[in-house]
Amino acid sequence: MTEWGDRYFEHAQRDRTLLMNMSLCGVAVCAAALFTGCAAAQHGAAKSPAAAQQIIRAGTQASTAGSMDYFTGRVRVEPLSPASSDINASTAYVTFEPGAHSAWHTHPRGQFLIVIAGAGLTQEWGRPVQEIRPGDVVRCPPGVKHWHGAAPTSSMTHLAVTGSVDGKSVTWLEKVTDDQYNAAGAAAPQEHKAMTAEQVLSAKQQAIPLIASFMAASDMPKLNAALNQGLDAGLTISEAKEVLVQLYAYVGFPRSLNALGELMKVVEERKQRGIQDAPGREPSRAIPTGDELVAIGTANQTQISGVPVQGPLFDFAPVINQYLQAHLFGDIFERDNLDWQSRELATVGALAATPGVEPQLRSHMAASMRVGLTAGQLRQLTEVLAERGDADAARRATKALTQALAAMKGQD
């Protein structure tokens, strides 16, 4: 990596619906298996009128970072529903960044995992590692020692449905060692590359680069349409705001402020039409300050760039790298209310719409693959830009992806 850009970083709705249906079916299976036996054993036949159903709105519950005592790497837990006396199981979304994973553990009443996105690994004590992909359902019986998490080069999100006994749902054991995880990654089925190359962007993911592209071009009518498309596809208001705030670092404060104003307008118009969009959530943890912020930002920058960022440009103007490390990769990328894949989709969309930044666009194509997006998904991004965005942006993105893939092949 010798150029500045290289150092700086070097059909869809149907598939989303299918994954969602598979997830809901998995939840139904989980509920039947976990709850029926539990209810029969503890309560017998129903003796009182059924309670009214309750709706817990998306984005209304605070997420938390996975404890370093029980997880390795960056993990986010989004609680959905707690266990109760009548439904003795809790539910939560858990997102693992690439390489992140749980410690060894057991569940006293068992657990179901429904993979929603990405690629992951799970292993039962004394047995081979298994790769898990979107739509897969993992059934873990009570007392079985195991671990699960993301693959080394891909993030993974699963829905966990976990039974409990006397208020306890998990027994944590020792951490998975680096040797155990590395062996698991090496032993994972090698058809993974072929499978993930065929994965598609969800409708929500497709909307992000379009939003970013129209924001960068200051095309407000098309930005308005893209924001509506993203909200219709499940983008929360918080996620949409985060995309537009982050992009000030790439296309400037004026465009960011104008785009945020357009989002306010869109949300209000949708309210007037009776559409209540999910508010989403705020970051789950406080952002560190001082030397700790710089250290975290530098680590994030190195992970996304693939190598420590250094060279003559940063020797000439070291303050720019300080801003990158402390602010962009520290303050912004530590905000976990938008995952890194979404952040890179936004950055690629914005840079593709900006003439003259081709080296940075190429670097962010490579960075996108480092955070778990596949070449197939990035090709789909270029197709989305060509079909629903700007032809010049699509051509720039296609060329950058081709160059990034060639450079990665050359390194192999």
Image: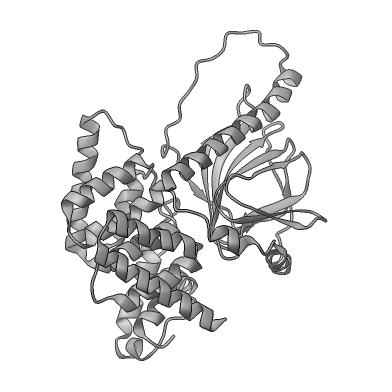
At a point 68% along the width and 55% down the height, the residue shown is 103
> What is the count of numbered marks?
0
Q: 137 or 145, which is in the foreground? A: 137
At a point 41% along the width and 71% down the height, the residue shown is 401
Left/right placement of residue 1 relative to residue 32 reads left
Residue 343 locus on image (x, y percent): 39, 60
Q: Quadrant of residue 36?
A: top right
Task: Reply above or below: 158 against 332.
Answer: above
Task: Reply above or below: 127 against 248.
Answer: above
Quadrant location of the N terminus in the rendered image: bottom left
Task: Reply above or below: 215 against 312.
Answer: above
Quadrant location of the C terminus in the rendered image: bottom right
Q: 130 or 381, which is in the foreground? A: 381
Residue 102 locus on image (x, y percent): 65, 55
**One can see residue 334 in this view:** no
Q: 71 or 17, which is in the foreground? A: 17
Residue 221 locus on image (x, y percent): 17, 49
